[in-house]
Amino acid sequence: MTDPDTLIDARDAVASKAVSALELTRRMLTRTQALNPTLNAYNEVLAERALATAKRVDDGEITGPLAGVPIALKDNLCTSVGKTTCSSKMLADFRAPYDATVVKKLEAAGAVFIGKTNLDEFAMGSSTENSAFGPSRNPWDTSRVPGGSSGGSATALAAGLCVASLGSDTGGSIRQPAALCNLVGLKPTYGRVSRYGLVAFASSLDQIGPFTWTVPDAALLLNVISGHDPKDSTSVPLDVPDYLATVEEPVKGLRVGVVKEFADLAGLDPQVKAAFEAAVATYKSMGATVVDVTLPNSHYGIAAYYVIAPCEASSNLARYDGVHFGHRTAEQCKDIIELFSKSRAEGFGDEVKRRIMIGTYALASGYYDAYYVQAQKVRALIKADYDKAFESCDVILTPTSPTPAFKIGEKNADPLSMYLCDVFTVTCNIAGIPGISLPCGFTIGEKPLPIGLQLLAPAFAEEKLLRIARMYEAATDWHKARPILSETI
Ligand code: GLN
C-alpha cells in the first residue's frame, strides 16, 4: 500500500490499523534519511522519541485526534526534547526547558514529532538562506528556495517527510513557502493560537499555524492548536469552533473581493497574474460575486512592516547576550560590555544584525516619532482599510507571492528585493487578520513551479475562511500534484 500522505488519511489509516503508527513513522524516518541530506528540511530528527511515541500509540497507551500522525515542528518552537536553535549560531546548543503550548497540545492529541525544521535565522527572511545551517531546497526544483522563513516545514511536507507541519508567520512565513511548495498554509488571527514557547521575533505580528496538503487537514490541525492560554496574555479567550465539522459546507451568496491596487503591481510575474485571474474566474463559475475593493494604504505595508518588525526584534533579541541566553564568546574580554558585544557579533548572522540595527535606530529617542510612531499610525490605517473592505465582501483574494520559487542565491545580495516577496502577505499580520494560501496553478517549463492563491478574512472568521478555501480546493486539482523526488533519493 502507498503511504497516506495527508493528515486525515494518515490518521484514518492508523486508527483503522491499515498501517501501524510504528510502520508509518519508520517509513518517514527512512525517507528523511535518504532525502534530508539534499533538502536540508530538518535541523534535527527526533527518531528515538518518534519511534517511542509511535509504539505507545500502537500499544493503545496514547489516543487522540492525531494519534500516530507524523508531524514536523519549526525549530523556533520550544521542545523539551532535542534542541531549539532558531537556525542561529546563537542558539546552536540551546535546549528549551519546556514545551511550547502548541507542542503540548499536539502531544496530547497523540502526534508523533519527526523533527525540528530549518528556517531563516530567527524567522527573518523569505527563503531559508539566512539559516546558519544552510538553505533548505525546494522539492519541486532543488536549485530553488522553498520560501521562508518556515521553508524547512514546507520542504519536509512537500517531500513527504511528515504529513503536516507547524510554522510561524510574522509577515508571510507560512503562506509564502506554502505557495512556493504547493501546500496549504494558514496564518490564524492574532490571538487565536498561543505563542507561549514560540521564540519571539516581532511579538505583535507573530502567529503559529499549520502547513498541510488540504484545507480539511488545516482545519483539523487548527482545532488542535487553537484556544486561550493563560500563559500567553495576547491569546484570546474565545471558544474554538469545530473547524473540521463545517469545512465542507459551501458559503451561500459568497462575495469575493479583488483589490484594485494589486491589479498591476510592479514585479508581479505574468504567470502568477494569469493563475490568480483564473482562480477568481473559478470562484465566479461557482456562483460567487466578484467585488472590487480598495486598500488605499496597502502600498505602505512593506515600509511599515520593516519598521515595526525590526523594532520589536531589536527589543526581543536583546536577551541573547551570552549571559542570559545564547552563544558566549571564548575570547578574553575586558568587561561585560565587550563580552556582550563579542558574543552577539559572533552569534548572529548578517540579516539578524541588519534588523537589530534598523530597529535600534528607529527606536532611538530622536527618531522614535518619525519612524516607530509613524509606522503604528500607518498600521491603524491599514487595519481600517480592511475593516472597510470587508463590509462589501466575505474574503479578499490576492496572489500569495509575486513570483514563483526563485533560485538559491538569486536575491541574496539585495535585501530589498527579498523584502518585496512579502508585498501581498505583510498587511494581514499588520491588521492581525487570518490568511491562507492555496495551490492555484503551476508555471510552464521543464520544471513547473507551484503558484499560490491567498484568501484573507476578518479577524476570527477562520471558520468561513476555511469553508471558502475548501470550495476552491474541491473544484480544482492543483493540491493533488506532488513533486517527483526519486532522482535525489
Ligand atoms: N519575510 C518576512 C521577514 O523577513 C516575514 C518573515 C516571517 O513571517 N517570519 O521578516
Image: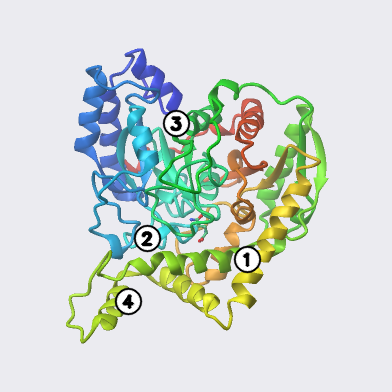
Q: Where's residue 231, x and y in %?
A: 40, 45
Amino acid identity at mark 1: Ala
Residue 205, compared with residue 376, is above or below; it is: above
Cα separation between marks 2 and 1: 25 Å
Q: Where's residue 288, x and y in %?
A: 78, 31
Earlier sequence position, callout 3 versus callout 1 = 3
Earlier sequence position, callout 1 versus callout 4 = 1
Does the Cβ of the disc 2 residue fall within 8 Å of ligand 1? no
Helix, strand or loop status at disc 2: loop
* Other residues around mark 3 within 10 Å, as few (<14) / some (14–19) / many (≥20): many
Q: Which residue is mark 2?
A: 131
Rendered-image quadrant of the C terminus:
top left
* Other residues around mark 4 within 10 Å, as few (<14) / some (14–19) / many (≥20): some
Amino acid identity at mark 4: Ala
Q: Which residue is mark 3?
A: 224
Does the Cβ of the disc 1 residue fall within 8 Å of ligand 1? no
Mark identifier at residue 345: 4
Amino acid identity at mark 3: Val
Identify the residue at horizontal 30%, vertical 26% (top origin).
24
Q: Is residue 161 something one can see in this rendering? A: no
Does the Cβ of the disc 3 residue fall within 8 Å of ligand 1? no
Q: Which residue is mark 1?
A: 304
Count of numbered circles on the image:
4
Cα separation between marks 4 and 2: 16 Å
Q: Is residue 373 left or right of residue 19?
A: right
Residue 417 lies in quadrant: bottom right
